Amino acid sequence: MAFLLGIIISFCVYVSIGIFLFRKVKSSEEYYVSGRSGNTLMITGTLVASFLSTVSFMGEAGFSYEGYPILLLILVIFNASGYIFGVFLFGRYLRRSKSLTVPEFFGNRFHSKKVRLAAAITTILGIAAYLVAVTQGAAVLLAEVSGVSYPMALVIMWVVYSSFTILSGAKGVMVNDTIMFFLFSIATYLSFPYIIKSAGGFPDAVTKAANLAERPDLLSWHGITGPAATMGTPWEALAWAVIMGLVWGIVIAVSPWQSSRYLMARNEHVAIRAGVWATISILTVYLFLHISISTITTIKADIAPTEKVFIWAAMNIVPTWLGVIIVSGIMAAALSSCSSFLQIIGSSITRDIMEQSRKKEYTDHHLLRASRISMVVISLIILLIGLFQPPAVMWIGYFAATLFAASWGPIAISSVFSKKVTKEGAFWSIVFGFFGVILGESLGMFGISLPVYLNPVIIGLILSIGALIIGSKYGTITIEEREFHANILQTPIEIDEQKEMNITRRYPAYLMISGVMIIMVTLVFYYWPINMN
Amino acid sequence: MGELIFSLSYGGSLIVMGWITKVFLVRMKRNQEEIKAKDPIEKVGM
């Protein structure tokens, strides 16, 4: 009952914020990019909250529990770097373009409706699949906690995230994301000592987990390997983690639900600082979460499905008040991603497809109304798919998210750093990248298993880069493209630039200090206990 | 051995990121100074 009450209260808060901010949204710029007024805290909050979802707290937690916590953390080393490379190599240029959506940026950069449409369609298809996976994960959790049926839980989830997203757009999403970011971060940090204590206390809990008969090699760097395991050999496991980490790094750097957050930043310094805090937050949250999860194996080694491991911990081994925070935190992680995804899909449908297919532009008032209507329609479609498709939180999420690494990665970076890319190259790069991933995934259905280094995303990336190079041999670069490109390369100088730069210059030190602290935490809470024998 | 390398690399990646951020910021500052040198009238952020 306490869990349900916590969830209901948090739902009421999110919806109330949506209703309150509904009155404040007066223009499409406020609805799409929150009036470009986001401060460092809010951009960090929305970056991390839209990234972490049920894929992280359920899918990846389950994967970790099955025997791969360290492998997952190795993956995180590479993916978290996507925030630093992303903001410096793409995000800040995207922000300078003053676009309302990322497909709009690509369309303007290559002066091409075709490129914009291709980017918009990949956005809608990729994020819709991801949204289905995350919503289903949250519905599984809600059904488990509340006792309502899975379809009913799905409907409740839909009502909550759709309502505040449709009402208040990016403004409400940003505020709620920040609250949710705090909620699931607190849940992760606070659960750590309680789970360790329940598992036998420190350092015994970690030592026991490392020597558990049911999970040999659980805390080794490669996790459980062998013919019967998910991973083959230790080196194959490492190759998987590095490749997927790099792929996820590209996802973080260029995907629409991450890069579009920089469009909301007040200035470029805010975007950079948020990228730094997001990197630190992701590495810290994952470290604490996965060390906790690995010790749960010593309390109960047969939780099924494994995706429920953190929820099981919340309901069985921590105090009720903390369990309420954990369950509400996981719900928050799911809702924040759902709302960001819905907002991006709705914006893209209206701004990049509906408006572009008309001969004239929408007025601001019409754009706002059309955006809300398209969000209602798309959220209903997502609900129906969620009802009829069986849940598979982690793998659908991984597939949908990594689509963007292949189809957007090469074009995003070259749109900033190349003067030779043409609209033909850009268009075919997006198309080949997208279908390359789908082709790679489809091979599995015909019984063809690919080696780790030929992951479907790698196939997509190779095809995308090839199409970019070959396609750019055709077509000409227009004056509009050259002007737009020159404009985004122009570094902005703020009115109080010196003051802003002085603050931003401290951030490398923040990263390094956090790095030293995390090394100490890792040595104390992981390396030392597993080497005690 | 692999566990020790991991323990040092996980936080170590943040130290590397710190250096990378520093390099990017130095280049950003240099870029701004070049713009200011070319055009003494200050441009306000885009």
Image (cartoon, coloured by chain):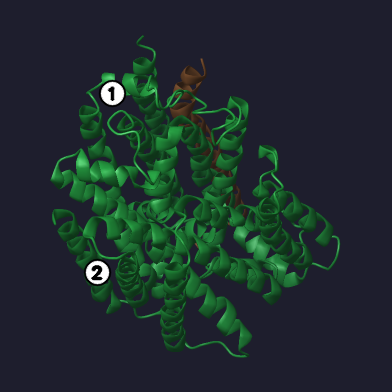
Residue lying at 60% horizontally and 31% vertically, measured from the top left? A232
Q: CA distance from mark 1 to mark 2?
A: 41 Å
* Closer to the camera in the image, A169 or A323: A323
B42 over A156 or under it: above or below: above
According to the image, label 1 marks what residue?
Answer: A205
Q: Are marks 1 and 2 on the same chain?
A: yes
Residue A488, percent from left and from top? 61, 60
Residue lying at 27% horizontally and 79% vertically, measured from the top left? A23
Q: Which chain is brown?
A: B
Residue A222, percent from left and from top? 52, 27
Chain under label 2?
A
* Pointer 1 with pointer 2, Cβ within 8 A: no
Amino acid type assigned to the residue bearing label 2 in the image = Ile
Residue lying at 58% horizontally and 30% vertically, measured from the top left? A238
Q: Earlier in the sequence, mark 1 or mark 2?
A: 2
A517 over A45 or under it: above or below: above
